[in-house]
Image: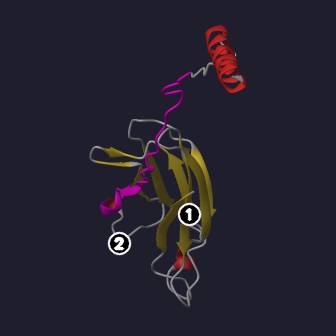
Amino acid sequence: MKKVLSIVALALVVSTSIISGTLAIYTTHIDALAQGSVVAKEFILTKGGTDTFVENVKIAPSETMSWQFSVKNFEGTVVSETAMDLDIDVDVLAPNGKKAIAPLVFTVENSAGDIIGTVNSEGKVEINDQFVLSAQGQEKVYTVSVNWPSNTNVDINYAGAGYGTAIQVSVTGIQK
């Protein structure tokens, strides 16, 4: 009889507890609290204007020659939508075994006409530029000009005799 009484008492305690909620199980579902994904950035850096860099162009005192080049962060419809720093070097070198013609002045300008750097006879102009964060394609245009200012008293001194008959201009760049 004690056994039956104990089972009835236990059944009463369990049912009372369930009804009062002390043994009830509470669950809460939280759906889609956060969600994310990652897509790789596309880095595109292309050149333009190299066909305007004509070689072996003749220049004489009082003349100026200009070339244009550009750097773009797009190709067709594919655009680098990320910001990037540009480091571009414009090197001016004399031919091997020769000196550069001393009066030559090389100037590098941006598309707004601002002078970025100047080199006399030979050297390097360093361009530090950037593409800002944008979904639209961007292009940076630069002009390299060489000018031979005339001075009739000394121009003849640069004809031959250890001075180069050519000067080399090269443009290289990287994105960071």
Q: Quadrant of the N terminus?
A: top right
Q: Nearer the viewer, residue 93 or 14?
A: 14
Identify the residue position indicated by label 1 in the image. 89
Identify the residue position indicated by label 2 in the image. 55
Q: Nearer the viewer, residue 72 or 80?
A: 80
Q: Which residues are magenta?
A: 28-51
Q: Name the N-terminal-most of marks 2 and 1.
A: 2
Above/below status of 56 relative to 13: below
User: Type of residue at label 2?
Assistant: Glu
User: On the picture, is 143 further left or further right than 52?
Assistant: right
Residue 17 % position (x, y): 67, 14
Above/below status of 75 relative to 3: below
User: Type of residue at label 1?
Assistant: Asp
| Mark 1 residue crowding within 10 angstroms, few (<14) / some (14–19) / many (20+) | some
Above/below status of 33 relative to 63: above
Residue 107 % position (x, y): 55, 55
Dot 1: what SS? strand
Q: CA distance from mark 2 to mark 1?
A: 19 Å
